Image (spheres, grey):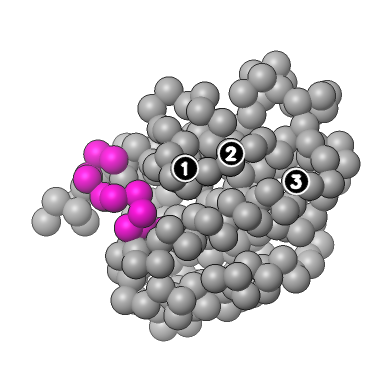
């Protein structure tokens, strides 16, 4: 797991933020921010060495993994400000720390007080709980595991390019090698298409963003209530 995180840290890409290696002097709380996020990810994966399910979405979002270091997991969850998801389901007993800068003018009042919140994270963690899936039996990931953003605007999201998806599959296969025999569930067509292209079998559900939350929930119910 440590070597896997180190390989993630080594990645450099244009218009891409690597949360486990990159430091943003404006939006990060300090130079220690990347190390906090890397430690979060290592803890997250270590707790899930025997996971049964791998949910793979598209790319890290600025409201989620950019600051938490974990896919579909918001900083607000880790800081204990989320109304329905507790920090302990993510990392157990842990030294939870924020990495976004509460003094940054790019953050709104709520973000400065409680950290970033991501709608996809709320839906995803809610579905794990609703279907009785142990949080330590499921790994949340992205087919492009880094945060792609629009030119010059780090607090935005963009769709990963074809080249980035081809890069991302390498890390997905590494993760499948570290935690073998997981059932793979692709969230959205970008993840599903890339996994199919490289011969990785998976179920596919719609992405919950852009008004697709109900379709996502219905598809998840179909998979786990059969």
Q: Is residue 142 magenta?
A: no
Q: Looking at the image, which residue is at 78% across and 65% down?
A: 13
Residue tagged 3: 33
**Of the residues under marks 1 and 3, which one precedes in the sequence?**
3
- Could you tell me which secondary element the residue under label 1 belongs to? loop
Disc 1/disc 3 C-alpha distance (Å): 20 Å
Span of residues in magenta: 129-139
Q: Residues within 10 Å of mark 1 (few under 14, many from 20)?
A: few
x and y, in percent, of residue 25 in the image = 88, 41
**Of the residues under marks 2 and 3, which one precedes in the sequence?**
3
Q: Are marks 1 and 3 in contact (CB under 8 Å)?
A: no
Q: Looking at the image, which residue is at 52% across and 24% down?
A: 81
Question: What is the quadrant of residue 53 in the picture?
Answer: bottom left
- Residue 218 versus residue 9: which sits nearer the camera? 9
- Could you tell me which secondary element the residue under label 3 belongs to? helix
For discs 2 and 3, the disc positioned in front in the rendered view: 2
Residue tagged 1: 93
Number of the label disc, if any, that sits on residue 22: none
Residue tagged 2: 96
Q: Residues within 10 Å of mark 3 (few under 14, many from 20)?
A: many
Quadrant location of the C terminus in the rendered image: bottom left
């Amino acid at each position: 797991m440590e070597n896997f995180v180190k390989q993630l840290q080594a990645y450099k890409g244009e218009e891409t933020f690597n949360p486990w290696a990159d430091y943003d002097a404006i939006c990060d709380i300090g130079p220690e921010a990347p190390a906090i996020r890397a430690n979060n990810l290592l803890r997250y994966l270590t707790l899930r060495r025997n996971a049964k399910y791998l949910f793979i979405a598209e790319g890290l979002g600025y409201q989620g993994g950019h600051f938490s270091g974990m896919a579909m997991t918001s900083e607000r969850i880790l800081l204990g400000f989320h109304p329905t998801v507790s920090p302990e389901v993510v990392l157990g007993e842990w030294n939870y720390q924020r990495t976004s800068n509460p003094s940054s003018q790019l953050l709104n009042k709520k973000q400065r007080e409680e950290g970033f919140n991501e709608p996809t994270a709320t839906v995803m963690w809610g579905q794990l709980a609703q279907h009785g899936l142990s949080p330590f039996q499921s790994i949340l990931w992205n087919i492009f595991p880094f945060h792609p953003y629009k030119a010059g605007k780090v607090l935005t999201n963009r769709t990963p390019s074809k080249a980035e998806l081809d890069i991302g599959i390498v890390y997905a296969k590494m993760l499948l090698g570290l935690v073998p025999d997981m059932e793979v569930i692709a969230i959205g067509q970008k993840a599903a298409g890339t996994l199919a292209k490289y011969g990785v079998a998976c179920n596919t559900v719609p992405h919950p963003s852009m008004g697709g939350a109900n379709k996502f929930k219905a598809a998840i119910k179909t998979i786990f209530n059969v």
